[in-house]
Amino acid sequence: METIFTISLLMMVVASILISYRFVKGPSIVDRLTALDLMSYNLIAIIALYAALSEDTLLIDAAVVLSLIAFLGTLAFAYYLINQSKP
């Protein structure tokens, strides 16, 4: 079972590297925002996998807090984009 968690963690790290590429090379601000959201949710998945691997319940609390912050950041940025496009 530990091998499955390790392989999953490695796959999530590779996905984070690919997401980072899209964040840097994104042609528009919306692409970069999407990549940043995906990166934060990928980090939440990595924390959850590591919490399951190490059997540490405190890390799940950190993942929940990070997901709330990421969601609020997405809402704030979407509000900014909507208000910026209005004359």
Image: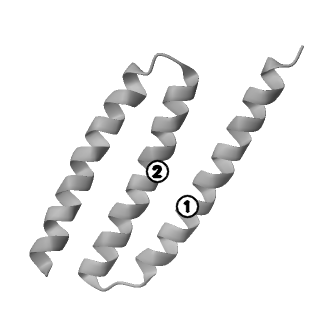
User: Percent from the top left, x then y, of residue 72?
Assistant: 68, 52
Looking at numbered disc 1 in the image, what kind of residue is underneath it? Ser
Pointer 1 with pointer 2, Cβ within 8 A? yes
Question: Who is closer to the viewer here, 28 or 62?
Answer: 28
* Residue drawn 37% across the image and 28% down it: 22
User: Percent from the top left, x then y, of residue 15?
Assistant: 27, 45
Looking at numbered disc 2 in the image, what kind of residue is underneath it? Ser
Residue at numbered disc 2: 40
Residue at numbered disc 1: 67
Question: Who is closer to the viewer here, 56 or 21?
Answer: 21
Left or right: where 77 falls relative to 50: right
Q: Residue furthest right?
A: 87
Q: CA distance from mark 1 to mark 2?
A: 8 Å
Q: Residue furthest left?
A: 3
* Residue drawn 54% across the image and 34% down it: 33
Label 1 packing within 10 angstroms: few (<14), some (14-19), many (20+): some
Up-down: is 20 above or below 3? above
Left or right: where 48 falls relative to 84: left
Mark 2 element type: helix
Mark 1 or mark 2: whose residue is earlier in sequence = 2
Label 2 packing within 10 angstroms: few (<14), some (14-19), many (20+): some
Mark 1 element type: helix
User: Percent from the top left, x then y, of residue 3?
Assistant: 9, 73
User: Percent from the top left, x then y, of residue 61?
Assistant: 51, 76
Left or right: where 30 falls relative to 48: right
* Residue drawn 43% across the image and 61% down it: 44
Up-down: is 14 above or below 56? above
* Residue drawn 35% across the image and 84% down it: 56
Left or right: where 45 falls relative to 14: right
Q: Which mark is residue 48?
A: none
Image quarter (top left, top right, bottom left or bottom right) of the N terminus:
bottom left
